[in-house]
């Protein structure tokens, strides 16, 4: 009798426990097969990864625009250090910007080179020129850039190597750029040389050479690709 009374007054029991919500019964297969939701940024934070040594600067307004903005900022900085008056700084920057624009634009009907080394182009009859007043390291680098985009890879390497041969005080802004591009130039042909140049880029950044566009961080990905192609998977994953 006591048992019957207890059963009669007992609270109704739920079919599902507190950790088994009822909605799982509506679409049982879907609930089991659906991929779990995750917050990638939060999961990365939980892993407590090693802090980044080099700052990455992803492009927010297009890679070419980011590169141009970084170069003009560096150019103004070095001209200012050299005591060039603001009006002349503006004139040199504008002239250099106009010459750089020739790398990616061509007048209608102009013959255009399409070198296999990149996706950009230079009109044959509209080859860029080094702007008068351009600091020597910027002039060296730009000569290499012109040659690179015209498909004259050996000439490009020669210009960038000459830049890196200057005394340290004369190449504070373009050393990381030159080392980075030398690495890019050797990636397919001689991967070992590419790896050396990518590592040099990071070393230069650690030594205090200017790296406005974040090239040191970018070399980690390029080096990882070289290692992946060499089937050195653990090294590639670590990078």
Image: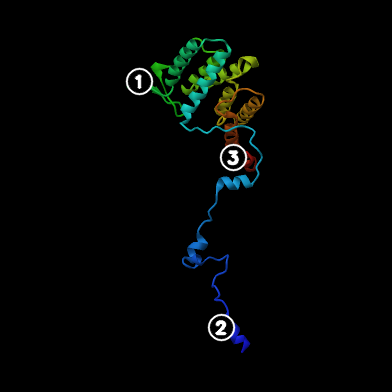
SS class, disc 2: helix
Q: Residue 221: percent from the left, percent from the top?
A: 58, 36
Real-space Cα distance between discs 3 and 1? 40 Å
| 150 shown above or below 24 | above
Residue at the extreme bottom of the image, as rendered: 1
Mark found first going from the N terminus, 1 or 2: 2
Q: Residue 82: percent from the left, percent from the top?
A: 57, 11
Observer-nearest residue: 25 or 109?
A: 25
- Residue visible at 45% across and 16% down in the picture: 94
Q: Which labelled disc corresponds to residue 228?
A: 3
Q: Which labelled disc corresponds to residue 8?
A: 2
Q: Residue 83: percent from the left, percent from the top?
A: 56, 10
**Residue 116 makes an appearance in the image:** no
Q: Which labelled disc corresponds to residue 107?
A: 1
Real-space Cα distance between discs 2 and 3? 71 Å
User: Badges 1 and 2: C-beta atoms under 8 Å apart?
Assistant: no
Observer-nearest residue: 28 or 221?
A: 28
| 63 shown above or below 164 | below
Mark 1 crowd level (few <14, some 14–19, many ≥20, 10 Å Cα) = few
Quadrant of the frame with the C terminus: top right
Closest to the camera, between mark 3 and mark 1, is: 1
């Amino acid at each position: 009798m006591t048992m019957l009374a207890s059963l009669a007054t007992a609270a109704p029991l739920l079919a599902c426990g507190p950790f088994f919500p009822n909605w799982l019964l509506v679409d049982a297969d879907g609930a089991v097969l659906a991929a779990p939701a995750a917050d990638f940024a939060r999961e990365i934070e939980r892993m407590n990864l090693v802090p980044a040594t080099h700052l990455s600067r992803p492009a927010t307004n297009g890679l070419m625009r980011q590169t141009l903005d970084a170069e003009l900022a560096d150019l103004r900085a070095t001209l200012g250090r050299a005591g060039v008056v603001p009006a002349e700084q503006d004139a040199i920057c504008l002239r250099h910007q106009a010459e750089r624009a020739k790398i990616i634009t061509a007048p209608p009907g102009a013959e255009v080179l399409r070198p296999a080394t990149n996706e950009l182009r230079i009109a044959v009859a509209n080859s860029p020129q080094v702007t008068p007043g351009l600091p020597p390291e910027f002039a060296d680098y730009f000569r290499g850039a012109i040659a690179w985009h015209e498909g004259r890879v050996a000439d490009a390497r020669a210009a960038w190597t000459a830049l890196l041969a200057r005394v340290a005080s004369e190449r504070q802004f373009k050393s990381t750029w030159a080392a980075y591009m030398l690495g890019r130039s050797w990636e397919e042909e001689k991967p070992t040389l590419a790896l050396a140049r990518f590592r040099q880029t990071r070393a230069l950044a650690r030594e205090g050479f200017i790296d406005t566009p974040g090239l040191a961080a970018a070399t980690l990905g390029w080096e990882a690709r070289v290692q992946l192609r060499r089937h050195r998977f653990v090294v590639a994953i670590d990078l």
